[in-house]
Image (cartoon, grey):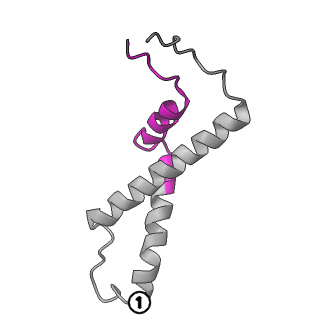
Amino acid sequence: MNLPPLTAPPPLPPDRADALMEKAAEMEAAFLAEMLAHSGLDAAEGPFAGGAGETQFTSFLRQEQARLMVEKGGIGLAELIFRTMTEPPHDPA
């Protein structure tokens, strides 16, 4: 069975590329927020540590920290995700 050769898809319109990059950045931020949650860096100590408020709002702080990390360049995951979503499929032959 001969399959036709894979061809490159047409270039993405700028608004579509921007939307995909935004979603990729959101995915990187979600990943970083989860990594921050498991790092233990948010475990405060001292007389003002703990409590219901800290427990409820720590996740918001992590999400914002992760978003700012991505905004400042992140770890490159968003770019990798974006390229994966926009590159043409590779010909296995």
How many numbered marks, from 0 up? 1
Mark 1, other Cα within 10 Å: few <14 / some 14–19 / many ≥20: few
Amino acid at pointer 1? Ala
Q: Position of residue 41 (x, y in %)?
A: 30, 66
The residue that mark 1 highlights is: 52
On screen, residue 28 above or below 38: above
**Secondary structure at numbered mark 1:** helix
Which residue sits at x=72%, y=37%? Answer: 15
Instruction: Tell me if residue 7 is in the magenta stretch.
Output: no
Determine the residue located farthest toward the front in the rendered image: 1
Which residue sits at x=44%, y=19%? Answer: 90
| Horizontal arrangement in the rendering, residue 61 relative to residue 42 (left or right) | right
Q: Position of residue 24 (x, y in %)?
A: 52, 44
Which residue sits at x=53%, y=11%? Answer: 4
Which residue sits at x=52%, y=46%? Answer: 25
On screen, residue 11 above or below 56: above
Q: In the rendered image, is residue 8 in sight?
A: yes
| Horizontal arrangement in the rendering, residue 60 relative to residue 23 (left or right) | left
On screen, residue 69 above or below 85: below
The quarter of the rendered structure image containing the C terminus is top left
Instruction: Tell me if residue 68 is in the magenta stretch.
Output: yes
Q: Position of residue 10 (x, y in %)?
A: 66, 21
Q: Position of residue 87 (x, y in %)?
A: 52, 25
The quarter of the rendered structure image containing the N terminus is top left
Q: Which residues are magenta?
A: 67-93
Q: In the rendered image, is residue 71 in sight?
A: no
